[in-house]
Image (spheres, rainbow, N blue to C red):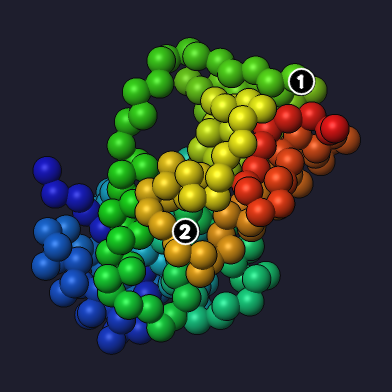
Amino acid sequence: MRNGILVIDDDEKITSMLRRGLAFEGYDVYTANNGVEGLKMMLSADPDLVILDVMMPQLDGFEVCRRLREGGSTVPILMLTAKDEIENRVKGLDTGADDYLVKPFALEELLARVRALLRRKEPSGDASGQRLIFEDMIMDLDAREVVRAGNRLELTAKEFDLLHLFMQNPKRLLTRDLIMDKIWGYDYSGESNVLEVYIAMLRQKTEEHGGKRIIQTIRGAGYILRGET
C-alpha cells in the first residue's frame, strides 16, 4: 500500500518540486498552498506524513502543527523553515513537529528524512499494557503516557520515543549515534543539534515539577538515564 504525503507550502516552486520528487519515489502526494487549506486536506486525504512550511499566509506552520496535535493527530510532521535560528527550531519541535529541515535543502536529504519518519510510524510491537518504571517516573506504553511524582508530563511523540529509549536502558550509556539511529532512523553526520534540542526539552519537562535531573550528559560520550551523582 502506497504511503500518502501531504505537502503544505505556499511556495509553488517547492510544492511542484516535492510533488514530482515524492511521486517518483512511489508516494501519493497531496498539496495545499496555505494552512487553512492544509487542515481541510488532512480530513479528506488522511495522509501518512505531513511536510509543513512555517511561513504561510492565513495560518503559519506553527499554528497548523499545534491544531493538529491538539486535535489528537499523531501523523509525523516534517517542518520546513527558511529560518535557522534555534528559537524557531525549538518552537517547531515544541508544537509537535517530529523533525525540521532548513531551506534551501537537497531533495535527497528530505527523502531520507521522510523514509525515517515513516519507519518510525510503523508499529513497534510493544506489549499492550506494558509499563516501565524508573525511580519516581512511570511510562505507560499502551496509553503513551508518562507520570513523574504524580504529575502527568505533556510530551510530544518524539519526546516520548526518546524517553522510552532511555527507560528501556536505565543506567546504560547511550551514544549520540545510537540514539540518532534508534529515534530518527539515520545519521545526521553531526550537522544538526536536533538531539541536543530534544534532550533540553525533555529535561525541562521531566524537571518542571521540582524533580531532580535524571538524564545526564557524559561529555564526549553520550547520555545516560540515572539519578544525580
Q: Is residue 12 above or below residue 113?
A: below
| Cα gap from disc 2 to disc 1, whole angstroms | 29 Å
The answer to whether 158 is drawn above or below residue 123 in the figure is: below
- Label 1 belongs to which residue? 136
Q: Amino acid at mark 1?
A: Asp
Q: Is residue 127 above or below residue 59?
A: above
Q: Is residue 229 left or right of residue 186?
A: right
Q: Position of residue 90 (x, y in %)?
A: 63, 62
- Does any portion of residue 156 appear in the rendered image? no
Q: Quadrant of residue 34?
A: bottom left
Taking depth in this image into account, of 13 and 10 the one nearest to the observer is 13
For this orientation, the residue located farthest to the right is 210
Tell me, yes or no, whether the two marked residues, 2 and 1, touch with CB atoms within 8 Å.
Answer: no
Q: Which mark is residue 99?
A: 2
The answer to whether one can see residue 27 in this image is yes
Task: Tell me which amino acid carries mark 2.
Answer: Asp
Residue displayed at 71% across by 46% down: 218
Q: Secondary structure at mark 1?
A: loop
Does residue 114 appear left or right of residue 152 in this picture? left
- Is 117 placed left or right of 2 in the picture? right
Residue drawn at x 85%, y 32% is 229
